Amino acid sequence: MMMNRRAFSAALVAGAAATLLSSRGMAAMAAPVKARNVVLAHGLFADGSCWSEVIARLQAAGLNATAVQNPLTTLPEAAAAVKRVLDRQDGPTVLVGHSFAGMLVTETGVHENVSALVYVAARAPDAGEDYTALAKTYPTPPASAGIVFDGDEGRLSEAAFLRDFAGDLPEARAKVLYAVQQPFQKALLAGKTTEAAWRSKPSWYAVSTEDRTINPDLERFMAKRMGAKTIEVKASHLSLISHPDEISQLILEAAGQ
């Protein structure tokens, strides 16, 4: 029996839609792989201890959590540190990155042990994309003006750290975090990812709606582009510290818990 023109057109459109369904879209629709391991990478102005509040909650849920002390020197060196930790995992692993470490998640998330990706107010570039150029298409966040350099070593001023980086934390807590911030090297910011793990791995994203370090609309754009399961948290850039329950729950979801 022959199709009429309307039926044929509908079938053609349906077929085209199926063809255009991206691999990441298919991955996002699938049920999360059950994982017991979580690897967490930190961003600029921080070290692995920034994940302490989240780690405690993941451990209470029975997960094996490891924070990477990734160097803030060059992108290849930082990615290598994450890869070494991923190599040690004994099965499916959720890879989590905050802020700059979204670059590391994007680059190393193709690792065979990684079952899911979680971005927390994080960069999420495409392979080879100039993230700095992408960020410039949005209003510049206030924290950028607070970066000070000693030669090639950069850090945040105390005023910018308290106001624009950790704005929703008690001042005394934010001052402790400021005191232990890890400086970064200028060369780190020049790196470009060679992979885009979110194109093949299911992804989750936590947008910080009050973020003054990465523009929240840029976060929303990146989350939508990757087809990530997205939540919005009324938090500063440090949602992993000010809202650890919400961030932990997102990670648990990515772990199939």
Image (cartoon, rainbow, N blue to C red):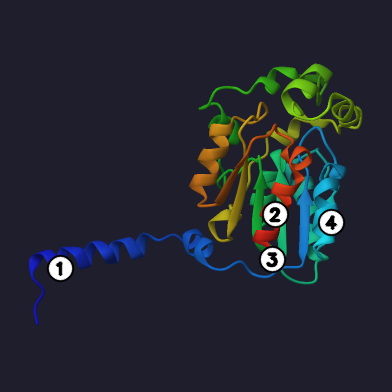
- Give amino acid for label 1: Phe
Which residue position holds label 2? 249
On residue 194, which mark appears? none
Gap between marks 2 and 1 measured at Cα:
46 Å
Q: Earlier in the sequence, mark 4 or mark 3?
A: 4
Q: Which residue is painted at 70% across and 31% down in the image? A: 236
Pick the front one: 204 or 151: 204
Q: Nearer the viewer, mark 4 or mark 3?
A: 3
Q: Earlier in the sequence, mark 3 or mark 1?
A: 1
- Give amino acid for label 3: Gln
Q: Nearer the viewer, mark 2 or mark 1?
A: 2
Q: Which residue is painted at 83% across and 28% down in the image? A: 170
Q: Secondary structure at mark 4?
A: strand
For the C terminus, the quadrant is bottom right
Q: Nearer the viewer, mark 3 or mark 1?
A: 3
Q: Secondary structure at mark 3?
A: loop
Q: Earlier in the sequence, mark 2 or mark 4?
A: 4
Q: Secondary structure at mark 2?
A: helix
Tell me which corner region of the image, top left, top right, bottom left or bottom right, holds residue 243. Answer: top right
Which residue position holds label 1? 8
Q: Secondary structure at mark 1?
A: helix
One can see residue 101 in this view: yes
Which residue position holds label 4? 66
